[in-house]
Every structure is written in C-alpha cells, then in structure tokens.
Image (cartoon, rainbow, N blue to C red):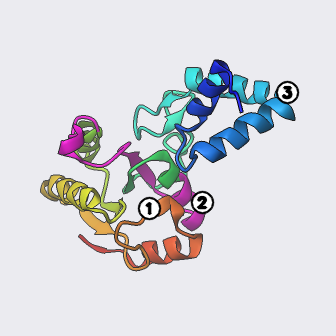
Amino acid sequence: MSITPLLEQLIEALRCQPGVGPRSASRIAFHLLERDRHKALHLAEILRQAVERLGHCEQCRNFSETPLCSICSDPRRQSDLLCVVENPAQLAAMDHAIHFRGRYHVLMGRLSPLDGIGPEELGMDRLEQRLREGEIKEMVLAISPSVEGEVTAHYISEMAHPFGVRVTRLAQGVPMGGELESLDSGTLTRAFELRREY
C-alpha cells in the first residue's frame, strides 16, 4: 500500500509515545483520519495548549499552569513530610493510590551519568534548598528500584542526613526494575505503609 509522505510523518510522530510501535501508530493514524477527524483536531488543539501552557511548579517541579501547583499551594498538606518521585506520573499514582497528605519533589528522571543526567538536571539544588529551610522531618523516597534508581536514592539520602531528616524508602511489593506508575494501588499503598529507613 502506498503511503503519502505526510501520512508517513504522522505515523512516525505517533511512534514517539511509549509503547506505541509501528502497527499501533498506523492503526491510530488511520483511525483518526478515517473516522474521527473532528476528535483528531481537538486532540491536536489540546496538545498544543498543553505544550504552550503547562510548565513546572516552582517548588516541586510537577506540571502546573501556575507558578505553584495545586499540591504545593494547598495549606492542608503536611509541610514536614516530603515524597520524592521520579516523574509526574509517579506523583499522580502515589497521590491517588495512598491519598498521601504531604508534599512532593519531582526529579524528572534518575541519575544516569552515561546519559548525561546529573544532579543539576534533576533539580537536586532545589531539593537541597527545601531541606535547608528546616521544615522537612521525613523524606520518603518513592524511586523505582533500578540501578539508576538505587544510585539516585543513595545520593538523596546522603544529601538529607546532614539536615537530620529521616529518610525512608518504599518497602515490599515493588519489584526490582519495576516502574511505580505501573503498580496497582493496593501494592503501592502497602509499600508506602511498610516503608523502611534508608
């Protein structure tokens, strides 16, 4: 079957999404063009708005349309309990699954020197500033248990100890190499409840 250059570009653009291979990208492209052109235009407009208007919270680095996200600006949240996550998807999973009432810090990745991701790229200076302010009493490391995750957790733990902050880590139920946002809420809740000193 002959595919026009523009259709080929659309399929290739859809492949940039995690878990979308060539066949899935083709199915999505053909479906949008054959049956849902109105929805395709709506999707394109919402995506454009999100890219233009969503930035990062000045405090926790979560996605936000305002300088402070709704979590950081919520006075009912515990300011002495901080949960460190790798990305906004993990924040959403944690907040939904366990109804966490503290605050967050979003790293936007894990330390990976081979990929050029160091402390600066993960906002470690901002995290250290939050620790210096002296309000945080416990920091929960909700970082995926991969090699990079272990290195990241160790780095953060070493950073926190001089400030007298209790550092804990999610407990059982989180498989080695697993991604937190993929876990069911029961497993995530149990892992949080049984967190251990790090």
Q: Nearer the viewer, mark 1 or mark 2?
A: 1
Q: x, y percentage for residue 84?
A: 36, 54
Q: Nearer the viewer, mark 1 or mark 3?
A: 3
Which disc, if any, is residue 38?
3
Q: x, y percentage for residue 149?
A: 29, 58
Magenta range is: 92-121
Q: Nearer the viewer, mark 3 or mark 2?
A: 3
Q: Is residue 3 above or below residue 72?
A: above
Amino acid type shown at disc 1: Glu
Q: Secondary structure at mark 3?
A: helix
Q: On the picture, is 60 further left or further right than 36?
A: left
Q: x, y percentage for residue 128?
A: 23, 43
Give the distance between the C-alpha atoms of the residues marked 1 and 3, in whole angstroms: 35 Å
Residue named by callout 2: 96
Disc 3 crowd rating (10 Å Cα; few below 14, some 14-19, many 20+) is few
Give the distance between the C-alpha atoms of the residues marked 1 and 2, in whole angstroms: 16 Å
Q: Earlier in the sequence, mark 1 or mark 3?
A: 3
Residue named by callout 1: 179
Q: Earlier in the sequence, mark 1 or mark 2?
A: 2
